[in-house]
Image (cartoon, rainbow, N blue to C red):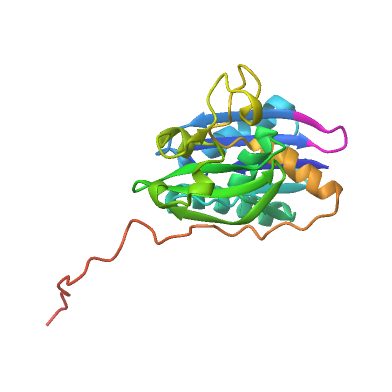
Amino acid sequence: MLLLALDTATPAVTVALYETDGDRLLAASDQTDARRHGELLLPSVDRVLREAGRPLQEVDRVIVGTGPGPYTGLRVGLVTAETFGAALGIPVLGLCTLDGIAYASGLESPFVVATDARRKEVYWARYADARTRVGDPAVDRPEELPAEVTALPAIGAGARLYEEVFKGAWQEGGTGDQGGPGAEPPLGQSAAALACLAAEKLAKGEEFPPPRPLYLRRPDARVPANYKVVTPK
């Protein structure tokens, strides 16, 4: 089975092609530009397919990160995935973006994933291990998180951004639960990790959440209040 994975819920525009029959990553592309998701995504898909030497028509499943993430970036990946699914007549499977970051860590003890939600907030979730999320993702100001959360080993761009709050932020060269000496924590999303996680879930016959966005809050753009309505006389 050929999986095309993509995610635009973070500043990263990440795409990967994964073959489940041989459990192997065929190609991947990772770029970071929070303002160019729409411009970079399709060329990234094309580049990954060309590098792997496989046509789009051979893809059996599309895996897409569902966030949480900002409205504009997140919808680019979801709409693109749904379009591929409709055009090819194949299933589109959603996975929480934070789950992909957690999976890439390989941690086997409790930790937290935190990404930058802007507005001085973070999207976050707790994990029992790299494959097991505890509860639903949430969005909060870092200083308002419970002490038992901020004391856990923490990975992701949000943990790095607010190191003064996340006391257990995983540092390069950490030890113990924070990785071996010289270990580097995953800061952002990787479609390769998302594809690997999806392959595991498919092999076990597990269900996937629908490919629907986890916005968790209202978009930044709003209709102005008390604006003057102009109508023709």
For the residue pair 21 and 204, the one nearer the viewer reads as 204
Whether residue 11 is visible here, answered yes or no, is no
Q: Position of residue 118 (x, y in %)?
A: 37, 45
Residue sitting at x 11%, y 83%: 233
Q: Position of residue 11 (x, y in %)?
A: 46, 38
Please say if 208 is above or below 172: below
Q: Position of residue 49 (x, y in %)?
A: 69, 32
* Quarter of the view holding residue 116: top left
Q: Position of residue 188 (x, y in %)?
A: 54, 35
Instruction: Based on the picture, tell me whether residue 24 belongs to the magenta stretch.
Output: yes
Q: Quadrant of the N terminus?
A: top right
Whether residue 137 is visible here, answered yes or no, is yes
Residue sitting at x 80%, y 43%: 200
Please say if 175 is above or below 74: above
Give the residues in magenta. Answer: 19-25
Instruction: Based on the picture, tell me whether residue 157 belongs to the magenta stretch.
Output: no
For the residue pair 167 and 59, the one nearer the viewer reads as 167
Residue sitting at x 16%, y 78%: 231
